[in-house]
Amino acid sequence: MKKSLWLFSLMLVLALFLAACGGGDDASAPADDNNTEETDSNDTEVTEEEGPKEGGIVTYGFTSPFKGVLSYAYYEGTDDAEILQFMQEGLTATDVNLQTVPNLADWELSEDKLTLTFKLKQGVKWHDGEELTAEDMEYAWYLIADPTYEGARFSNVAMIEGAEDYQAGNADTISGITVVDDYTIEVKVTEPSVNLVDNIWTVPEPKHYFGDLSSKEVPDSDQVRVNPIGLGPFKVKNIVPGEMVELERFDDYWNGRPLLDGVVYKVIDGALASGLLESGEIDIITAPSDQWEIIKDLPNLENEVVDALSYSYIAFDMGYYDTENNVVVSDNPKFQNKTLRHAMATAINRQEFVDSFRNGLGKPLNVPFPSVSWAKIPDDQINTYDYDPDKAMEMLDEAGYVDVDGDGFREDPEGNKFTINFDAMSGAETSEIRAQYVLQAWQNVGLDAQLNGGALKDFNLFYDTIEADDPSVETFHGAWGLATDPDPSGIWLSTDKWNMWRWYNEESDELIKAGIQFPEDPSKDVLEHRKEIYYEWQKLVNEELPVIFFEQREDAWAINKRLKGVTVTPFGVLDFEKWYVTE
């Protein structure tokens, strides 16, 4: 009864708040004086029947401040990735069918599956006018394999012959890389893998532009943070750190002159999204789910909802990342009890959370693959951790977590006070109330869970704190956007820096590595072989539960009707050079 009253009060407050934000009054929204100053578009409206025309600037909204690390080799979050998508590209790309296809290069794989040869397109130019060459791809691999590299993408070059020796300082070169000529580069790998083209790093970096910078210096350099260049359809014109990036058309873009004059990437207050969309100050954004009921009915928008290649989770901090040995160490005793983790998952009504705070845009998930992935295991083969607070309390009792002193909260099996710190991000109008919902669910089964430090953290501080292995972090509510290939390496191997829950499991590592190997029986279908392995891996992760897989998401894209040519996919939007405006 206590829980039901709390939820009713919570939803009443939320409903009133949404109603108050539903109008068009956005006087408190930050102004963007550059949004319409530099457009060359005609003053008259252009109908779709007349076809796309050049000109105009659109504003792309995002709800969290960006770090400004504008290099794919070094960026850390969606905030920077959504800027990079306009200005940088790779040798390969992903099409609407989630398949890897040639982009800046074609490729060939040798018969023994150990040598990959890329043939670059000729005449592709960097934003400063210099031509892309094979040395730029070689340079990117060397940056990531460098001993001073502090990013999280070494797993994307680790398969290259000699990369590990180079990283360890035992070699002066990476033996597996050969630049054949200006447009041809060969790379040898240590063993065959079925997803080599999907997994190997394919985004070049401008060797001529970075000059003598060390790999460690690159992410903080002016070449990345102030005047970054790329190969994409738009180039950076101006950066207001954390607030806005102005991009302008790159006339020499290899795939044809873009139609728009430019794109403004603008950070907004998520609570003002509906008003900014209604007024036209924002042309396109992944709609904040907690405002979807308002946004979906705005008459000036064309909206599209897609199953996303992303999910949110609540992680248990199991230890720390050993930077000397490049491996996670799971030495935190607090959450080693698997029954405790199962009980904490069972205590949360995830469907109610999705319905209440994401307006139904998603559904509970129990493994790290969303349903859009071909590798997703059916729910009838795994634990679904359905909401059952009585069962959760029974599990806690059995595991020895009982209320010894009568204060309403459980002590640990040794009788010591047991508290749980919980970290969550700010940025949405319901961020605080969502965090309180999770805390209340745990408190309802007798767990003394509190917001770490008493406050939410912004996007950058949230992940900085976790990646630094701050000892105050114990559980945290994060999210992942995934690659189209289901290979979990990069996030789940014990050597991955982005294994942020710091979970070490030998069987998991073995299965992950087996998932990219060719079957011993050459007659066996590769896809079925991989699916069998990933099913076993998901069963393991689902049972061990180092992470409560919270929800698989649906992305609701809100797009102003004047903006055309946008292709929406499960992993974002495409075809930026084809975007145009009708007025």
Image: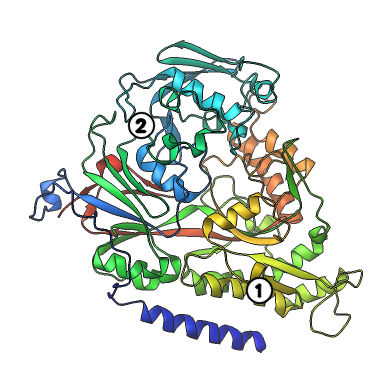
Residue 367 x, y percent position in the rendering: 64, 54
Q: Answer left or right for 253 relative to 119.
A: left
User: Farthest top residue?
Assistant: 180
Residue 210: quadrant of the picture: top left
- Residues at discs 2 and 1 in contact (Cβ within 8 Å): no
The one nearer the camera, 96 or 128, is 128
User: Farthest left residue?
Assistant: 44
Secondary element at tag 2: loop
Identify the mark nearer the N-term, 2 or 1: 2
Residue 411 x, y percent position in the rendering: 85, 74
Residue 208: quadrant of the picture: top left
Graded by Cα atoms within 10 Å as few (under 14), some (14 to 19) or many (20 or more), the crowding at tag 1 reads many
Secondary element at tag 1: helix
Quadrant location, the C terminus: bottom left
> Is residue 208 visible in the rendered structure shown here?
yes
Q: Is residue 237 above or below residue 411?
A: above
Residue 413 x, y percent position in the rendering: 89, 69
> Is residue 194 visible in the rendered structure shown here?
no
The label number, if any, that marks residue 409 in the structure image: none
The one nearer the camera, 314 or 102, is 314
The one nearer the camera, 190 or 385, is 190
Distance from label 2 to label 1 (Cα)?
A: 46 Å
According to the picture, the residue beneath numbered tag 2 turns out to be 231
Q: Is residue 281 above or below residue 100?
A: below
Q: Which amino acid type is marked by label 2?
A: Leu
The label number, if any, that marks residue 439 in the structure image: 1
Graded by Cα atoms within 10 Å as few (under 14), some (14 to 19) or many (20 or more), the crowding at tag 2 reads many
Q: Which amino acid type is marked by label 1?
A: Leu
Q: Residue at x 71, y 55 (%)?
A: 542
Q: Residue at x 40, y 69 (%)?
A: 292
Q: Is residue 128 above or below residue 549?
A: above
